[in-house]
Amino acid sequence: MNLASMTSQLLFLLLLSTGIFFFAKRIGVIRRNIRSGRDWDGSDRKAERWATMARVALGQGKMTARPVAGVMHILIYVGFVIINIEILEILIDGLFGTHRVFAFLGPVYDFLIASFEWLAAGVILACIVFFVRRNGIALARFKSNELKGWPSLDANIILVVEVLLMFAFLSMNAADAIAQSRGLDHYVPAGSFPVSSLLTPLYAGLTNAGLIAVERGMWWFHIAGVLAFLVYVPYSKHFHIILAFPNTYFSNLNPKGQMDNMAAVKKEVDLMMDPQADPYAAAPASEGPPERFGVKDASDLTWKQLLEAYTCTECGRCTSECPANQTGKLLSPRKIMMSTRDRVEEIGKQREAQGGEWKPDGKSLLGDWITEEELWACTSCQACITACPINISPMGIILDMRRSLIMEDSKSPESITSMFNNIENNGAPWAFPAGSRGDWTQEV
Amino acid sequence: MAHRGRSQQGAAAIGPKKYNHTMSSIHIPTMAEMTASGQAPEVLFWVGCAGSFDDRAKRITKAIARILHASETSFAVLGQEESCTGDPAKRAGNEFLYQMQAAQNIATLNGYGIKRIITGCPHCFNMLKNEYPELGGQYEVLHHTQFIRELIETGKLRMSGDQPFKGRRITFHDPCYLGRANGEYLAPREVITKLDAELLEMRRCKQNAMCCGAGGAQMFKEAEPGEREVNHARTDEALETQPEVIATGCPFCNTMMTDGVKNANQESNVEVKDIAELIAEAADLLEAPAP
């Protein structure tokens, strides 16, 4: 083993551990932020949960509801998953100073490399289509207000980086193939290069040294890019590539129309309805501070809802199916998820800065990020939930926030207040006397 | 519009044929009455607030009652003992009010030992079916289109030989709380098929159907500022199919679509009717044995 090889192995080890360190650190932060949410029990119906995850995340079951985006996404997804086998080889080569360590597989290796190349070409194609959809055709859901600035840039960075990484991968193969044909040291004949052979003319004129420089350069650029991507992803909407799996595992398995019955309210109602209850009895000593009704801030959400916020990849299918949004109202279900994520991130940062203890900062998700106008535009139609390719429920957060508006702040549009009064007084949302409820029976 | 002439003709021909609304011949028993005489009905007809108080929705209620009567279904209503399920209160954020309503209704229903409920309102359907069980109210709950399908399948309800809707263009607007909320897309369509009508699907239907704009307590408030009303947008989608009838399965959708049709100045061409009304007009209700 020579010095150059050892240096390069050490450099590789350093690069790899740095990437993994920052990735793990960021995962720790996200994990802590998600776990700061309220309890939610997803320990039931395991078989059904695995099946849902397999169908929706692994099988991309809801993606093809929109055929163009769906097929392109599946191409990138399959490419990403399968090309990772190649990453394994790169890791071994980098750490042990080998070159194409799996070459001994012979025809199997040729097949693998050829399929990686086809997939890389597919990924490049899909990324270009996506880039054009976002920036050229400018589909409405990619031009909404909530995507201005960082979210749009984030999406474009990912697309450009993916193209660059795939280009580096193909260039590396092209240079390798030429080196193999020249019989250069280390470059054992291995692999089949159906796509990268198109790039051969780019590098065929290089000297041996130039060729090796290109091959090594692309190899390093590719792996360094992959590691940088690893660190970047958990800061990005792109984190769905990992969180889509737990998020779909913890999908809501109940009918979509079923809203939870608040246990705290049930306790009080039971007490009120109980003829044996002593109305003057002192309230039982409660453990800890009383829970707030509904959701005012991100800290009132369940961990599952926070997981959804981190999982959202801002595709906007929810918003484009939302009847309120379609008719020009302020509500955008995607923005509800994005605001939630922004706020939980902010709370997390403050908590960290204050040594693990979060002191309220006078701001809240409801009010400073999400307005009442947005909440009151929801028709609770569940189109957003149905449209989400990974079963996120923006509607759940919206309705939980209405609970806070009503039960904590008594804030509602006047007509809603009258509706409440009517139900309370007449048992109907309109001001008809309860006694006339059966009048229709006289007219049949 | 190209279809105006034909549709007008269609609409004129459809009106109530067999039943005179002012004729009061059917006795609708209440649970209190039945219990007093030592009887128990097979099903409870949960009418809902819209069906009890709203003039347009009452016509749907009466159609359901006539179907139940003609099919010799043993049924009763709660009458004055029925109260709002709490859906609009809950979806507007008032969990207290909802749970008070639920507790009261469950006490009433359990007091009568109710097992099976049918209702014409998908919001009541969703509450009774999905949200009451945890609070102690466990019933088999059917939407009226599910029950009508059952009546037809078991031969208890027969379509008349002279089908008033034969070949008519009918489109069905999926109620969110029957469709997406509870996955029932088939029952209403299968019932419409029995009318020998031409069932037209809107561009967005079933799980992709657009909301009429009434749910989530929107029915009881002004819409938020925007470019247009949700029900107008949805009605446009329905009108694209060039229907003679827009069929609904929810009293709130019915109100919203009726308003949408008026807004589009199509009320002389297109009728908005609940599936129960269509069936009440098309089935052999009068030929059923007298009570």
Image: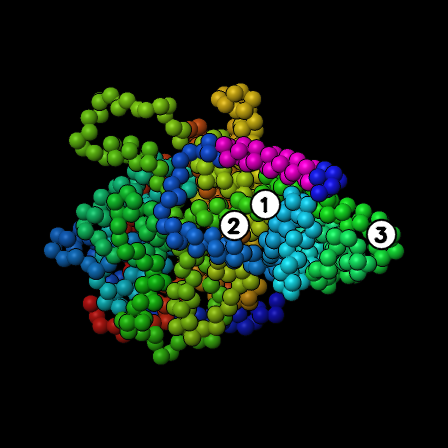
Instruction: Give the overall secondary structure of the magenta segment.
Output: helix
Q: Residue A176: x and y, percent?
A: 76, 55
Disc 1 to disc 2, C-alpha distance: 9 Å
Which residue occupies the foreground of this view, B84 or B21? Answer: B84
Amino acid type, mark 3: Asn
* Residue range (magenta): A8-33
Q: Which residue is mark 2?
A: A390
Left or right side of B57 for A214? right
Q: Which residue is mark 3?
A: A208
Please tell me which residue is depicted at 73% across the width and 63% down the height of the picture.
A194
Which secondary structure, mark 3?
A: helix
Chain bearing tag 3 is: A
Chain bearing tag 2 is: A
Above or below, B237 relative to A273? below
Amino acid type, mark 2: Ile
Check whether the beta carbons of the residues at disc 2 and disc 3 lie within 8 A of each other: no
Q: Which residue is mark 1?
A: A313
Above or below, B241 relative to A420? below
